[in-house]
């Protein structure tokens, strides 16, 4: 099996929408491979690699954030209407980029209560919380 992580490096640029716990962990990890990483938050941070994106308040970053981007990861949950904020604002832009990879990091909540057992994409979703149901 090819080690896909070994193909990452300084010429890769990740754009991570939603840098909460999981997004931040992913950003820190991917930086260790020498990749450039830009992360979003809903408010301004004292970090040159952070940009503000708040779809509810219509705060949309300038599209120059996409310059040189090779990978996009969205960790932002659907809005109250079940719509994906990243796709809502940037779908057309992303379709016109030469991206190597696009991902969406959801939650294990879509699998419901597994009584502590492992779950994977092969398992049938059984969400019971409304916010988890919207992520399917």
Image: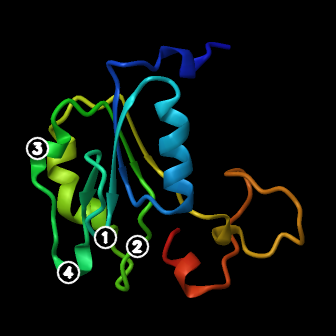
Distance from Cα at disc 2 to Cα at disc 4 = 15 Å
Query: In terms of secondary structure, where does tag 4 sit?
Result: helix
Q: CA distance from mark 2 to mark 3?
A: 24 Å
Q: In which quadrant of the rendered view does residue 67 lie?
A: top left
Q: Which residue is mark 1?
A: 42
Q: Are marks 2 and 1 in contact (CB under 8 Å)?
A: no
Could you tell me which residue is drawn at 89 percent across and 66 percent down?
116
In the image, which disc is placed on residue 64? 3
**Which residue of the protein is positioned furthest toward the front in this rendering?**
46
Residue position marked by numbered label 2 in the rendering: 78
Which structural element holds mark 3? helix
State if disc 3 and disc 2 touch (CB < 8 Å).
Answer: no
Q: Which mark is residue 55?
A: none
Residue 10: percent from the left, percent from the top?
Answer: 36, 19
The 10 Å Cα crowd at callout 4, few under 14, some 14 to 19, many 20 or more, is few
Upstream in sequence: badge 1 or badge 3: 1
- Is 2 placed left or right of 74 in the picture? right
Q: Is residue 136 above or below residue 99?
A: below
Determine the residue positioned at 40% across, 60% down: 18
Of mark 2 and mark 4, the one earlier in the sequence is 4
Q: Quadrant of residue 118?
A: bottom right
Regarding mark 1 in the picture, which secondary structure is present there? loop
Q: Is residue 47 above or below residue 32?
A: below
Alpha carbon separation for disc pair 2 and 1: 15 Å
69 on left or right of 119? left
Foreground residue among 107 and 126 = 107
Q: Which residue is mark 4?
A: 57
Q: Earlier in the sequence, mark 4 or mark 3?
A: 4
| Residue drawn at (66%, 71%) of the image | 109
Q: Earlier in the sequence, mark 4 or mark 1?
A: 1
Q: Secondary structure at mark 2?
A: loop
């Amino acid at each position: 099996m090819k080690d896909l992580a070994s193909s990452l490096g300084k010429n890769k640029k990740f754009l991570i929408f939603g840098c909460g716990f999981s997004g931040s962990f992913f950003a820190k990890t991917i930086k260790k491979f020498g990749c450039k990483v830009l992360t979003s938050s809903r408010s301004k941070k004292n970090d040159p690699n952070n940009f503000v994106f708040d779809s509810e308040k219509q705060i949309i970053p300038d599209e120059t954030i996409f310059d040189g981007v090779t990978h996009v990861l969205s960790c932002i949950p659907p809005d109250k209407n079940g719509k994906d904020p990243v796709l809502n604002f940037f779908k057309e832009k992303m379709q016109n980029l030469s991206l190597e990879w696009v991902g969406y990091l959801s939650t294990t909540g879509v699998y419901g209560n597994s009584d502590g057992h492992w779950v994977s994409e092969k398992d049938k979703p059984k969400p019971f919380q409304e916010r988890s149901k919207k992520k399917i």
